[in-house]
Amino acid sequence: MAVIQRMYEGLFIVDPGFANKDPEAAVALCKGVLEKHGATVVRAEMWAEQKLAYEVRKNKRGAYVLAAFRSDTLKLAEIELECRLTERILRYLFVNRDGIPIEKWFKRYESKPSRPRETESSDSDSDGEETGARREKAAAAAD
């Protein structure tokens, strides 16, 4: 039977106290869990720390670690079990990303550069025109 290696994207939510003290250790923890079960980590990085939608193991915040890795499809269940047993990993999610270039899905997490501001006078002119157009639409809709 042939072993099928697929490309996966893994998003880990790590205990924020642990990740704040040593972000490299948080990334290394996630990489270690993957490599322990034969996965080849292509890229792993700390993404962000954010407030969680609901409390997870008495944590209101979580540090996100994003990883790209290749793994045998049968080993994914073992990786998930290891994540459940590791106390510092609060949650995890793995998505099959075969066929999608890695640069494309890592780029979406990078911050977008802000647009340069125009001069104050041109902003006020365009705002005035926009407001006038909105008033005309509202008046037409009222009739």
Image: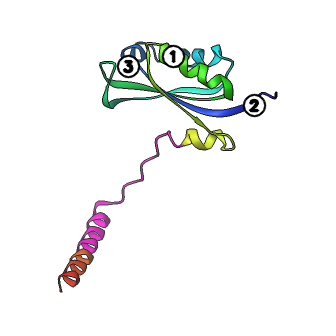
Residue at x 27% of width, y 74% of height: 129
**Which residue is at the far front?**
1
Q: Quadrant of the C terminus?
A: bottom left
Q: In the rendered image, which quarter is residue 131 located in?
A: bottom left
Tell which circle, 2 or 3, labels the residue nearer the N-terminal end: 2
* Residue 109 in the image: above or below residue 142: above
Distance of mark 3 from mark 1, alpha carbons?
A: 13 Å
Distance of mark 2 from mark 3, alpha carbons?
A: 35 Å
Q: Which dot, 3 or 1, sits closer to the camera?
A: 3
> Whole-percent x and y of residue 130?
28, 72
Q: Which amino acid does label 2 sit on?
A: Ile
> Whole-percent x and y of residue 69?
64, 28
Q: Is residue 72 magenta?
A: no
Q: Does the magenta stretch include residue 118?
A: yes
Q: In which quarter of the image is the N terminus?
A: top right
Q: What residue type is labelled 1?
A: Glu
> Whole-percent x and y of residue 56?
34, 23
* Residue 128 in the image: above or below residue 38: below
Q: Give the range drawn in magenta.
A: 108-131
Q: Mark 3 points at which residue?
A: 16
**Which residue is at the far right?**
1
Distance of mark 1 from mark 2, alpha carbons?
A: 30 Å
* Residue 15 in the image: above or below residue 7: above
Q: Mark 1 points at which residue?
A: 24
Q: Which amino acid does label 3 sit on?
A: Pro
Q: In the rendered image, which quarter is residue 63 located in?
A: top left
In the image, 132 versus 95, the foreground residue is 95
Q: What element carries label 3?
A: helix
- Tag 2: Cα neighbours inside 10 Å, few (<14), some, or many (≥20)? few
Residue at x 27% of width, y 68% of height: 127
* Residue 4, numbered label: 2
- Tag 3: Cα neighbours inside 10 Å, few (<14), some, or many (≥20)? many
